Image: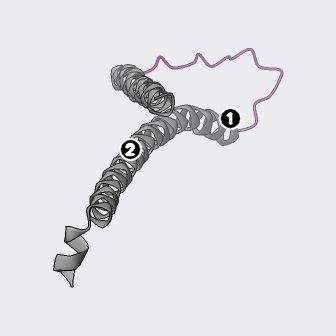
Amino acid sequence: MELLETQDPEKRKLIETSARHKQELEREIKDVSERGERMLKNALIIGGVLAATYLLVSRVSSSKKKKRKVVKQAQPAVDHDTDQEEEPSAPSLLHGVGERLAGAATVFLMDLAKEKLSDYLKNKKADEHSEGSEYTK
């Protein structure tokens, strides 16, 4: 039966065309899934960096607020008649190093997020241009 189908040139041509279309569709599906996977990975990386930066900044900034509130609440009531004023204590060296380290980490993570976002947008723009050129053919 197959011998008869392949002997007819019209049927043979249709079968070859069908096989070629099938391969092209499979290739396009593979490309689309790879692009989607890349976009998802980039989105997860960017989201993770932003979340980590947010947590880091919120911890650093909230620890200052908590310390100040605790200090204000822990102070006993002072007579307003006395002239004694408490001098604020100077921040410790460790506190300064921690703030600088947190600032540097924030800058690094934001820079990494910016690079990933930039790469993602460039890839998306390049993909749009390549898709547009396929449709104009």
Please tell me whether the stretch drawn in magenta is mainly helix, strand or loop: loop
Check the image and tell me how it is coloured: one colour
Marks 2/1 in contact by CB < 8 Å: the verdict is: no
Residue name at image x 62 percent, y 34 percent: 65
Q: Which residues are magenta?
A: 77-91
User: Looking at the image, which residue sits at the far bottom?
Assistant: 1
The answer to whether 104 appears left or right of 66 in the picture is left
User: Looking at the image, which residue sits at the far right?
Assistant: 81
Give the labeled residue for mark 2.
35
Q: CA distance from mark 2 to mark 1?
A: 55 Å
Give the labeled residue for mark 1.
72
Specify the amino acid type for callout 2: Arg
> What is the x, y in percent for residue 109?
39, 28
Specify the amino acid type for callout 1: Lys
Q: Is residue 83 magenta?
A: yes
Please identify the quarter of the rendering in which residue 64 is found: top right
Q: Is residue 113 above or below residue 16?
A: above
- The residue closer to the viewer here, 92 or 61, is 61
Residue name at image x 36 percent, y 44 percent: 38
| SS state under label 2 | helix
Q: Is residue 49 above or below residue 93?
A: below
